[in-house]
Each structure stands twice: as C-alpha cells, then as structure tokens.
Amino acid sequence: MFKLWASIVKDVRVLLRDKVGISLMFVMPIILVVVVTSIQNSTFQLVNKNKLPVLICNSDTGQASVQLIKSINKIGMFKVLMAPGDNDETLMADAMHGKDAMLGIIIPSNFSVRVDAKSKNIAGKALTSFGLQGDSTKKVADVDPLTVYYNPILQESLRLSVQGGIRSALQLVESRETLRSLYFSINEKQLPENLENEMLNNNTAINEIPVSKDGTRATPNATQHNVPAWTIFAMFFVIMSLGGSVVREKVSGSFIRLKTLPTNYLVGILSKQITYLAVTMLQAAVIFSMGIWLFPYIGLPALNLPSDLLALVIVTVICGWCAVSYSICIGVFAQTQEQANGFGAVSIVILAAIGGLMVPSFAMQGFAKSAANFSPMHWCLQAYYSLFLEGGRLKDVVNNIIPLFIITVVLQLITFWGLKRKNLI
Amino acid sequence: MAVSTPLAIDIERMGFQYPGNADVSFHDLNLKVAKGARFGLFGPNGAGKTTLISLMTGLLSADEGHIKLLGQEIGKQNNQINKLFGFVPQDFSFYQELSPVENLEFFGAWAGLSRQAIKKRTNELLNILGLDEVRDKQVQKFSGGMKRRVNLAIGVIHDPQILFLDEPTVGVDVQTGHAIINYLLELNKGGTTLVYTSHQLNEAEDLCQQIALIDDGKIIAQDSLDQMLKDHKKESLEQLFLNLTGKDYRN
C-alpha cells in the first residue's frame, strides 16, 4: 500500500508541475463550456425569446400584401422592418446589412391582384362543385413567389421554421380572400368581420410541456444541454496529459529503473488511474460549480443539478474511469508523446462527434447511428441527459452505465495485453 | 581463471538474440564475478555490454542457459532478486520534474524500503554526494554532474549487494567523476559488488580489479587487470583494449 501511495504522491507532484497539461485539462474545457453555452444560449434566445428581424419590401399596393404583413407580424417570431417598395436584390442585401435584418422578403407588385384572381377562381370552382353557378373556367396565373433573402449564418432548421411561418401567413391571406369571394358570390354582400375572424382565427391552442422522469416541468436550456456534454469532453481531454505521461515514463530512463525494482509496473498504472480519476472528478466539480454559480453572473442560465445526486456521482466516476482507461491505453500503445497527443486529440474529437456531443445522436442516420454505440462518450452523454434533462434516477441510467462499464473493462484488458506484449509488466 | 566463491554473478552457457536482429547475440557465454569484486566490462560500441547488463538485471530474458545473482536465478522470483541489486543506467533514470528528495522517496518505496528507512538513506546519500543544498529543487534545473549524482543516489537507495553501473560518469567534470569513483570505492569497501561499464578507461583503471573485454557478443579476455596487462605486455588498459579489439571504427 505504501508503494501505491508513494506512486500517487509522485504522479500528483509530476502533474502539478505540468502547467501545460493542467491548462489543457482545466482551462481549455472551461473556456469551451462557457463559449459554446454562450453561443447556443444566444441562438436559443434568438429562437425562443428574441424576435428575428425581417425586412419587408412591399412592391404591392393592394390589401392582400397588407394582410400578409399583418399575418407575419402576428406569428410572433418576427420583428418586421419595412423597406422602400422598389428594392431589388442588391438594394435588399444592403438594406438587410444596414438594419441588421436576418431575413428579407420582397412582395411582388402584382401580389394582391394575383391573390384576388386566384381566390375568385377557387371560389368559383367551389360554387360549381356545390351545384351553384360559378365562374371556374377562367384560367388564372399563379401568384408570383415571394422572394425570401436570408443571412447565411441562419441554420437550416431555423430557415425551415421561418419558411413554415411565412407559408402559414400566406395560407391565411389566401384563405381569407377565398372565403370573402365565396361569401360574396353566395350572399352578394361582404363577409362580416366577426364571422371572418371566427372562421380564420379560431386556432386550437398548443400547450408545450417538457416530459421529465421525475415529474418536474423545468424547461431545458443551453446550460443543461452543454455543461454535461462538455464536461464529458473535458474528462476525455485528460489524454493530453495522461497519455503523454505514460509515454514519457515508458520511453525515458526512469522506466528502465522501475523495471529493475521489486515492484510490478501495474502499481504505477493503478496509481495513474487513481490520480487521474481524481482529476476528472475535480474537472466535473469545477465545471458543474461554474454552471451553478458563475453562469448566472455572465447572463447564462444556471445549471440545475439532478435530484438523484448519487446517480450523478456514479455516472461521473464511471465516465472518468473510462476516460482515464482510454488515455492509458493510448499511452501504452503510442511510441512517442507526439503520437499519443496527436492521436489522442483527434480520436477524442471523433468519439465526441459520433457520440452525439456535436450533433445529437437522434439526428444521426444509418452507420453514424450504429457507430455512436461504440463511443463511450455516447453512453456518458445519454446517462447525463437522462439525469440533467429528463429528471432520471439511477435505475433510469443503468442501461447507459452497463455499456460504459463494458467499454472500460475492454480498454483495461487491451491495456494489460499491451503491457504484457511490450514486456512492460 | 579461478574465481573465489561465493559468486555475485554466475552466467553459464547463456544464449540470447534480439528477435529478428542478429547484430548482437550471445552463444554459450560464461562469466563469473566474485562477491565483493570491482568488475569492469569493456568493449567497443555495439559489442554487447549494455545488452549483457540488461540480461544480468532482468531487463532482457536469456534464451538459453542461466544467470544467477548471489545464487538466485534471474527470471524466477524476480521481486526477491531485484532487492539484491541496484542499477545506475547511462540515461538519467528519474523524474526531472521532481526534486532529489522526491525522487528518492518514490524510488525508495518501489525498492521496498519503509518510510523511516527512506528518510534516513535520503539524508545520508544527499550529504555524501553533495546534494544537500539542492535537495528540494527540481532536478531538471541541475547541471549534468549533479544529475549523475542523483542518478547514482537512486541506484543505491536500498543499499544493494550488487551495483550495476552503465557509464556512471559520462559527461561530467573531473571533480564530479573523481567524487563518484571515490564513493563507489567506499561502497565496495562496505561489501558491495560493483559491475561497471564505461569507455573512460583511465577511470576504469582506478576502479576495477577484475575486467572482461567483450566484442561481437563474445568475452575475448577476462582476468585481473594487472594479470592481463602483464600477459599482453601492455602498460595501460587503453593499449590493451586497442590490442585486443583492433583500431577499426565500430558502428
């Protein structure tokens, strides 16, 4: 036991004097968590709280375009800014830059006329199908498309939701006009406004409720998503110090001396596991503490810890142990420190990508979805999401812990085999 | 040649070859070193000195024959055998980020010493080797000579009965070299068997009583230094060395 203790003390001392290693393990992940959470929080705010600035250039003088602008305003996700009616593509781009608008819409000059003609035609067809006299034979031109310009930084998902919003506004305008034409054709008088509103605006409300396993109704935010994900990344980033440390010891003269001493090198490996497992626990504690106490001071949502703290500790320990096992495994097989650091860094980014840290694994398809199962980060992330976002308890994350544990044991066995094969133990 | 018993090192019919590399190989090699001897192993570059020391310290395993240290066969119960000897490799074999005290604490523990024994030996060794003033400073800031002394201190922390030294004074100034040799002579007086290899033959003349010349994996001569100089009618170890191993470059 004294040999193990002496080894742990040695590893801690070596680690504390490795300023670059400490920076890589603590400072960089902290910066990453803050930056990524801030960026995603801005997007989150943009989509959920702030209105997306949209510049509308109305070249039409009729009522349909006015109704369309009112409908776009009513959607609630846009802040409408008006541009002069004669803007072309170049002027629109300049105006968008000038007013910081993310979107620009040009309503064509014949919009109202075409909408009116189209609605009358549809109303005529409807009357004919009812067995009444209607003019459905006249061929009418399609309504010219609306041109929507957008800032390239807008993500596709956001653009699709913008398109959906505009489409529903258009639908409303066209439906209104069709309804009015139909009513006028039958009753030869204007559709009463209250009836029109009742018919068009009586939308059934949609209630959104986050489903959690513990019955709480907390709305997930950028912090709840990002802090667990980048904590996992930070834990696996110990490879930058630990992988190099194993290689350094292996290729330096100290290893030769260690081999001539009456102690098995497995004691050294165990010492590194304990030391760096403590480091990963410290990383998690620091990042979670930042999420809880620092984030609110810098305008980010505070992190809410899961209600089952024991489950959080267990998941964090196994996740840290897996990260340490992976780092030691790479260190044992790498010939040089450059190999360990280079392969380590790249492999972690790949494992993070296929593990769902960068793109959610539910959005992956085919091979990528299957490959996610081989990334330990995937299982760590699923376990954390279950605890942080779904209010899960220990029993809910067992299915994530078991594969993570199996991957860890496999890494340990590969390490042992590597040490034996290289005659290191 | 008669070697007085008991033996510190007994190598019999030992065979070894690096897998896939026949450049250095031993066949049927025999070597005996008496307990308490100051034994020097010399040879040109690539002759097999470091390989032979690696075999004697268990870093490599012999393919044939056996190697015994103080009667115990290498490869069996290595934990017991490893307590018997110390090793001072040519490379600096310690943690440069740590101080001499911290290095000795760690290597002392791995050598099987207790906390108290480590503390006692550390104080003794740092004092003897002139490292007391820098005991808590990081070794990476030391000069080459100081690092050599740290390297030596770690090798003898557990007071081994046999000490293997692979070029222990390479790259040091005259004063440090002199101090190290004097310390090794003191150790030998206390009963420690020294197995020494170096290219510094003048220094070797001061230290070694028994020598073996090795070339191309074979021991080409082995006896007391005085006897070998007399037999070959040479005045120095360097002349003897060149006479037996030739003057061609060795790669």
Image: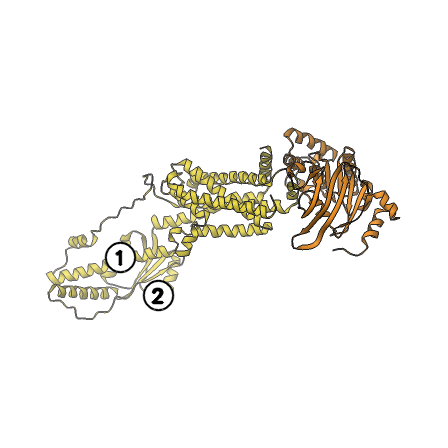
Chain colours: A yellow, B orange
Residue A167, compared with residue B230, is above or below; it is: below
Amino acid, disc 2: Asp
Mark 1 vs mark 2, foreground winner is 1
Amino acid, disc 1: Ser
Q: Are marks 1 and 2 in contact (CB under 8 Å)?
A: no
Question: In which quadrant of the rendered image does the N terminus of chain A lie?
Answer: top right
Q: Chain of mark 1?
A: A
Question: In which quadrant of the rendered image does the C terminus of chain A lie?
Answer: top right
In-front residue for pair A394/A121:
A394
Residue at x 77%, y 32% (from the top left corner) = B190
Residue A320 percent coordinates (x, y): 49, 42
Determine which residue is flagged by label 2: A88
Q: State the image quarter where residue A391 is shown.
A: top left
Residue B164 percent coordinates (x, y): 72, 41
Residue at x 47%, y 51% (from the top left corner) = A351
Residue at x 29%, y 56% (from the top left corner) = A165
In-front residue for pair A274/B225:
B225
**In terms of sequence position, does the residue under pointer 1 or pointer 2 come before the other?**
2
Secondary element type, mark 2 = loop
Q: State the image quarter where residue A23 is shown.
A: top right
Determine which residue is flagged by label 1: A168
Q: Chain of mark 2?
A: A
In-front residue for pair A206/A235:
A235
Res. A423 visible in picture:
yes
Residue B157, compared with residue A355, is above or below; it is: above
Q: State the image quarter where residue B143 is shown.
A: top right
Near mark 1 (Cα within 10 A), the count class, few <14, some 14-19 or many ≥20, is some
